[in-house]
């Protein structure tokens, strides 16, 4: 696959997010126009131990024709072997394997994985090369502006990734030590785009359709990954696609994924947000009843700003079954029916 060509019709993608981008969430985002969705990041070491819980992370939902899988680790041979296993397991449904070289959290970077590899470009290059040689699908790298705050290394890192066989680089405009503080620096994405010939995918601080248009316009990036902006808001993909397709920014369709009939492109109503949360909970329950507890954080994201959200959050955090969430959502709808939504208080 020519990944440059692929990105021409897959410009707005759901980023891999640990504990978030599971099959249920990917399905909802795809229905709203995400042209590709990535799995949660998967431990290559965990897969090598035949860890059932780890392998479960690459499960696709029924109807998911194409997905991206992100892996992490720091052992080139293990990364290559498990990338090959993923390719064999998913077959034609696998679009791309992404290597996480940007996760800054201690339990990942502290073990030499994720963002820690920014500090060891030689090892990072060995990993990229090993994985790229082991699989037929494109191999991409997701990384950050640099490791230490104030020390930008992304251009050299991107050049190394290109030379090592990466088909594209996804760049988050923050330093690893910055975590998610401050604002993402999109200028580093633009500078990196000018420095390499492989596609550059922009990431960081896309919370609206206007943000997405600005990221494309100011960096000339080839595609974007939406992460936190999609939490509790899968509609963001429909909104981004509409803005891009009507902006004249591109001379071809942005999204390869058809939107569902009646998909709202305006901000959803409070009732629509609650009903989407309900559907999300049921999708989780249908796949694995025990996993419905993951809905607690999703539910809080969906209802943020809706009258009664503060009280609902405490209720969500006590939910253990899908019926519990149904009762909580019903209570919120009942509360809304007593409040003039257009003039009620916003929390």
Image: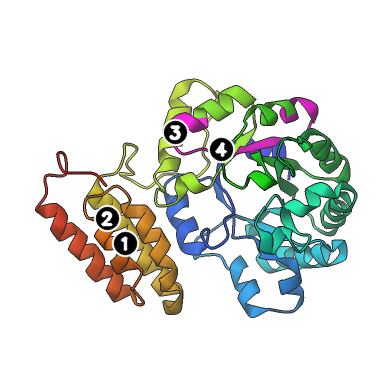
For marks 4 and 1, give the one nearer the viewer: 4
Identify the element where label 2 is drawn: helix
For marks 3 and 2, give the one nearer the viewer: 2
Q: Rate crowding at label 2 as few (under 14), some (14 to 19) or many (20 or more) other CA atoms within 10 Å.
A: some
Q: Earlier in the sequence, mark 3 or mark 2?
A: 3
- Front residue of 169 and 191: 191
Dividing the image into 4 quarters, which one contains the N terminus?
top right
Check disc 2 and report the residue beneath it. Answer: 309
The answer to whether the residue labelled 1 contacts the one labelled 3, judged by CB atoms less than 8 Å apart, is no
Check disc 3 and report the residue beneath it. Answer: 209
Q: Position of residue 33 (x, y in %)?
A: 46, 44
For marks 4 and 3, give the one nearer the viewer: 4
Task: Say if residue 290 shows up in the picture.
Answer: yes
State how far apart marks 4 and 3 are (Cα). 20 Å
Check disc 4 and report the residue beneath it. Answer: 182
Q: Earlier in the sequence, mark 2 or mark 4?
A: 4
Check disc 1 and report the residue beneath it. Answer: 313
- Front residue of 154 and 224: 154
């Amino acid at each position: 696959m020519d990944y440059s060509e692929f990105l021409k019709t897959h410009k707005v993608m759901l980023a891999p997010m640990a504990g978030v981008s599971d099959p249920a969430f990917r399905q909802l985002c795809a229905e709203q126009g995400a042209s590709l969705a990535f799995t949660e990041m998967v431990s290559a070491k965990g897969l090598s131990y035949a860890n059932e819980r780890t392998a479960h992370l690459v499960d696709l939902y029924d109807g998911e024709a194409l997905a991206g899988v992100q892996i992490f680790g720091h052992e080139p041979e293990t990364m290559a072997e498990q990338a090959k296993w993923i390719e064999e397991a998913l077959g034609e449904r696998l679009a791309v394997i992404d290597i996480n070289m940007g996760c800054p959290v201690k339990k990942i970077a502290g073990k030499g994985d994720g963002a820690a590899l920014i500090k060891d470009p030689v090892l990072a290059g060995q990993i990229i090369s090993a994985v790229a040689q082991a699989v037929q699908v494109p191999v991409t790298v997701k990384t950050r502006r640099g490791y230490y705050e104030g020390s930008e290394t992304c251009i050299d890192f991107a050049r190394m990734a290109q030379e090592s066989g990466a088909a594209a680089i996804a760049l988050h405009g923050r330093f690893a030590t910055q975590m998610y503080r401050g604002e993402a620096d999109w200028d580093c994405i633009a500078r990196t785009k000018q420095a390499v010939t492989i596609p550059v995918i922009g990431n960081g601080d896309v919370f609206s359709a206007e943000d997405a248009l600005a990221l494309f316009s100011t960096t000339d990036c080839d595609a974007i990954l939406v992460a936190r902006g999609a939490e509790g808001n899968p509609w963001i993909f429909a909104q981004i696609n509409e803005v891009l397709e009507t902006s004249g920014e591109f001379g071809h369709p942005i999204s390869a994924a058809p939107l569902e009939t009646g998909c709202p492109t305006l901000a959803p109503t409070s009732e629509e947000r609650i009903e989407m949360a309900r559907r999300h909970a049921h999708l989780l329950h249908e796949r694995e009843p025990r996993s419905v507890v993951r809905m607690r954080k999703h539910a809080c994201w969906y209802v943020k700003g809706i009258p009664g959200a503060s009280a609902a959050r405490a209720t969500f955090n006590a939910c253990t079954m899908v019926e519990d969430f149904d009762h909580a959502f019903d209570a919120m709808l009942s509360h809304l029916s007593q409040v003039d939504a257009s003039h009620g208080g916003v929390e």
